Amino acid sequence: MKKIITLCLSVSMIMLFTACGTTKGATPSQAAQSTVAEKPAPEMAAQKPQGNSKILVAYFSSTGNTKALAENAADILKADLYEIVADKKYTSEDLNYNNESTRATVEQKDNSARPAISGKVSSFAQYDTIVIAYPIWWGQAPRIIDTFLESYDFSGKKIVPLCTSAGSDVGSSADALHSLCSASANWVEGKRFTKGTSKQELQQWFSSHQIKSSK
């Protein structure tokens, strides 16, 4: 009888160690099946401006230069800040100027291209002045700026285009954007700023064009 009990205990121990060894040595996919799957983290929503300012600084930036300019502009004007985020973000390869088949090159050659934007401006009607900051791509504003301008009613609003570029001036980019808005929109002549433009220089330009803080 003792031998039978001893034999049963031995078999049980062998089965236990075998099960533990199987779980420990399982492949990642097999191990995942033995646990409760975690829910994926929710994607971050596009930034939405908050506050009671009458001025909005909306910007699109791929390298960070335009972002820095926009943040300074928002601080000077005590404005709300909104980042125009592409639904499909641009990679460094997308912006390769030396490749005619890259995403940005193809878009810039197509006047009808309208890259999708993730998120939208809440309470857009509250703003009476919109500062639009963008980089110069192939002599023009990125097509996603066209998408932004065609997504809202700018009737009666003052629009201030600012661009960043190492060499190209604002040129015809502002005129091309102007044509996409309501005829009643009040466009201020645009200005190009380079990387590292001081906050003081930007403030002086705003003052010279009678663009003041609404607070």
Image (cartoon, rainbow, N blue to C red):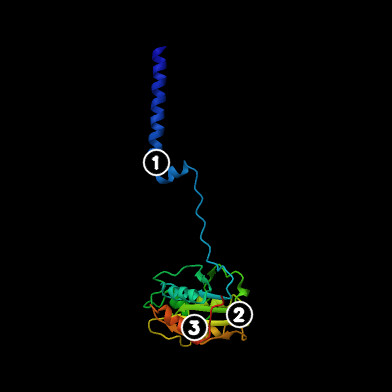
Q: Are marks 3 and 2 in contact (CB under 8 Å)?
A: no
Would you identify the image quadrant in which residue 93 lies?
Answer: bottom left
Please state which of the two labelled residues, at mark 1 or mark 3, is closer to the viewer.
3
In space, the residues marked 3 and 2 are separated at their CA atoms by 20 Å
In depth, the one of 75 and 15 nearer the eye is: 75
Q: Residue furthest front?
A: 215
Query: Residue 151 location in percent, x, y?
Result: 59, 75
- Determine whether the residue tagged by mark 1 lies in a helix, strand or loop: loop
Q: Are marks 1 and 3 in contact (CB under 8 Å)?
A: no
In space, the residues marked 1 and 2 are separated at their CA atoms by 60 Å
Please state which of the two labelled residues, at mark 1 or mark 2, is closer to the viewer.
2
**Tag 3: Cα neighbours inside 10 Å, few (<14), some, or many (≥20)?**
some
Q: Is residue 138 above or below residue 94?
A: below
Amino acid of disc 1:
Ala
Q: Is residue 90 visible?
A: yes
Circle number at residue 26: 1
**Tag 1: Cα neighbours inside 10 Å, few (<14), some, or many (≥20)?**
few
The N terminus is located in which quarter?
A: top left
Query: Residue 100 location in percent, x, y?
Result: 40, 78
Residue annotated with mark 2 = 154
**Looking at the image, how many numbered discs can be counted on the residues?**
3
Amino acid of disc 3:
Phe
Q: Residue furthest top?
A: 1
Query: Residue 97 location in percent, x, y?
Result: 38, 78
In depth, the one of 202 and 168 nearer the eye is: 202
**Tag 2: Cα neighbours inside 10 Å, few (<14), some, or many (≥20)?**
many
- Determine whether the residue tagged by mark 2 lies in a helix, strand or loop: loop
Q: Is residue 126 above or below residue 13?
A: below
> Of label 3 and label 2, which has the lower sequence position?
2
Amino acid of disc 2:
Phe
Please state which of the two labelled residues, at mark 3 or mark 2, is closer to the viewer.
3
Residue annotated with mark 3 = 206
